[in-house]
Image (spheres, rainbow, N blue to C red):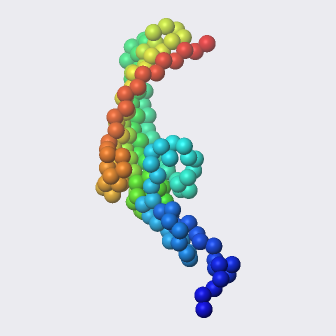
């Protein structure tokens, strides 16, 4: 005998948006587009990412300082599943940077900088290549600081 509509359990939403019944199965590798990520909360991955870094600064001249930095990032499995489709904890990225702070005036400093980021874990690299079309990233910046 078929139960009436009022006796049936309400349909649940499956992870892919299709209607289904029963328990939701945890789906690894569910990813949002970059636009959806930008519009969402930073805490959507419900996980963590840790970063250990070292920095060094040296005065090259009266008005010029060199800055060097490096860091290594580690993420939990849920973070990696959310952002890369890889359901494992791993060392994610290594970052290397160099900057040159130049004091043009007593209150004005201009700092050009370069940072290179590469992904460490091979599964994370593959996930990033499939999603973001890039495994490494170079960033060039120019910062001006005025103190008063």
Residue at image position (34%, 38%) is 137
Q: Which x, y percent locates residue 56?
A: 42, 31
Note whether residue 87 is visible: yes
Report which quarter residue 142 is drawn in.
top left
**146, 66: nearer the viewer:** 146
Q: Is residue 40 above or below residue 59?
A: below
Report which quarter residue 102 is drawn in.
top left
Q: Which x, y percent locates residue 70?
A: 39, 38
Which residue occupies the extreme right position in the image? 6
Q: Is residue 114 left or right of residue 14?
A: left
Residue at image position (44%, 64%) is 28
**121, 125: nearer the viewer:** 125
Note whether residue 59 is visible: no
Q: Is residue 136 above or below residue 89?
A: above
**114, 33: nearer the viewer:** 33
Q: Quadrant of the C terminus?
A: top right
Q: Quadrant of the N terminus?
A: bottom right
Q: Is residue 70 left or right of residue 126?
A: right
Residue at image position (45%, 9%) is 104
Q: Which x, y percent locates residue 107?
A: 54, 11
Q: Is residue 81 left or right of residue 23?
A: left
Which residue occupies the extreme top position in the image? 105
Q: Is residue 119 above or below residue 12?
A: above
Numbered marks: total? 0
Report which quarter residue 84 is drawn in.
bottom left
Residue at image position (57%, 50%) is 43
**105, 8: nearer the viewer:** 8
């Amino acid at each position: 005998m078929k139960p009436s509509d009022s006796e049936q359990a309400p349909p649940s939403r499956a992870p892919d948006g299709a209607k289904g019944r029963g328990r939701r199965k945890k789906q690894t590798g569910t990813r949002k587009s970059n636009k959806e990520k930008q519009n969402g909360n930073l805490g959507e991955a419900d996980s963590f990412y840790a970063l250990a870094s070292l920095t060094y600064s040296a005065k090259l001249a009266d008005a010029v300082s060199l800055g060097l930095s490096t860091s290594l990032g580690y993420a939990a499995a849920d973070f990696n599943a959310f952002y890369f489709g890889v359901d494992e904890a791993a060392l994610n990225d290594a970052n290397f940077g160099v900057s040159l702070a130049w004091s043009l005036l007593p209150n004005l400093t201009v700092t050009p900088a370069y940072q290179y980021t590469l992904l460490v874990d091979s599964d994370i690299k593959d996930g990033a290549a499939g999603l973001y079309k890039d495994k490494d990233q170079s960033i060039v910046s120019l910062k001006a600081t005025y103190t008063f």
